[in-house]
Image (tube, rainbow, N blue to C red):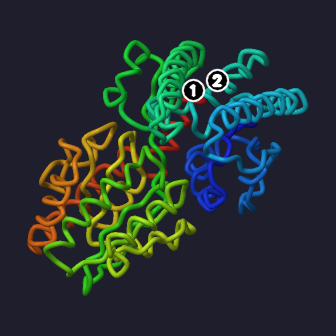
Amino acid sequence: MDLLIISEKTPDRNYVILADNKINKVITGINNLVRRIHVVCDENYCYNSSLKKILFHPVKNFKKISEKNTLLRLLYHLIYVMRVFLKSLKLIKKNPEIKFIINISGHFTIGLINVLAGLVTGRRSLLRLTESVQAAYFLDNSESLKAKLLNKLSYALAVILEKIVFRLCDKIISVVPPEYYPNIRGFEPKTVFIPDTILTNTDKRVRVKHSEKKIFFVGRLELEKNPFMFLKSILKVAEIRSDFKTLIIGSGKLEEAIRDFIKRNGLDDIVELIKPMPHNKFINLLNECYLLVNSSYIELMPNTILEALACGVPVIAPAIGGIPYLLNHGYNGFLLKNRDQETLAKLINKILDDEQLREKMSFNCKKFFEEIVDLHFGMKAVYDKYAILIKN
């Protein structure tokens, strides 16, 4: 029995660094259950896997298009999606051993291809829900009326597509418990909670004596990640103290604007931008983190928060998606109920001011992670869930 994985178009060439981690989180749970794994993906997304059973089937992508050409980018994305669909059909016809189709992400775009390919070929479609449909709100970060109308139209279309794929797929694999994503309501009988496997080796965590208090922001530098709220809160914190440093790890279309903000506000000595890096290097760096901050508008189950908990790093994050499942306010971090820079700055200062509170939260982070990892996020837990799903 073979498995077909279909992947979205890469939004950023630096994103390729994350491909190994992202695909492996799916493969880890299925690896021993199938004979071969076929991956249909963006030609820039292919990498040299250590697993010989993985076969990549690249799909040609377009050169980078100006962010201003929103309609053209949408058109090119539709062409890419169609290419993925045709490549998948051809691959299934050539390899009848393929019995299951699963998407890496993009459940209401690439997921639609997953479902349609399953219907046309008679294969089982396993729809992975890894992001919120609200992501369609953030296609354009301009304030023009045209962009706002386009975003509303895109969101309405995404909601419709989401309902269609939920109805037509064989199973919904949600990375968050269904109660944390209201759109699943009505589809609970076909939904199974299988989160991404945490690839962090918790046995190799190191205890770092923090000679420097480092605050991390990790994620794509895009509008939906809300990096400027984070930077404005850091600016407020920097007005009253200088005993900390800030690392922003990521890349994206807001990178130049962020660099300009840092320079204009005299934050060069406090804030450092770092490009995405291989996962093992990131985990080593995460061990040096004093506090992780997430300021996103939309999230489901952020892996960086899980990895921070594994490393004993307290987290401040908004109370959205599956984040309240991971964070208990005041126990292993703080939940942002008012998403504004003043509130965030106060919570950052609260942790920077109180070493005992930070140490207590760090202990609680590890304790909480160890309680849930074997139940849901460990390799064995994920493997067992996939085994039950596929065998049934």
Residue 307: give its label.
Answer: none
The answer to whether marks 1 and 2 mark residues whose Cβ atoms lie closer than 8 Å is: yes
Disc 1/disc 2 C-alpha distance (Å): 6 Å
- Residue at the location (83% across, 44% down)? 60
Residue 52 locus on image (x, y percent): 77, 57
SS for callout 1: loop
Q: How many marks?
A: 2
SS for callout 2: helix
- Is 167 above or below relative to 333? above
Amino acid type at mark 1? Phe
Amino acid type at mark 2? Leu
- Is 169 above or below relative to 310? above
- Residue at the location (49% across, 55% down)? 254
Residue 219 locus on image (x, y percent): 45, 56
Left or right of 66: which side holds 278? Answer: left
Which quadrant holds the C terminus? top right
Left or right of 320: which side holds 257? Answer: right
Instruction: Name the residue carrying label 2.
Output: 112
Instruction: Name the residue carrying label 1.
Output: 108
- Is 137 above or below relative to 191? below
Left or right of 187: which side holds 115? Answer: right
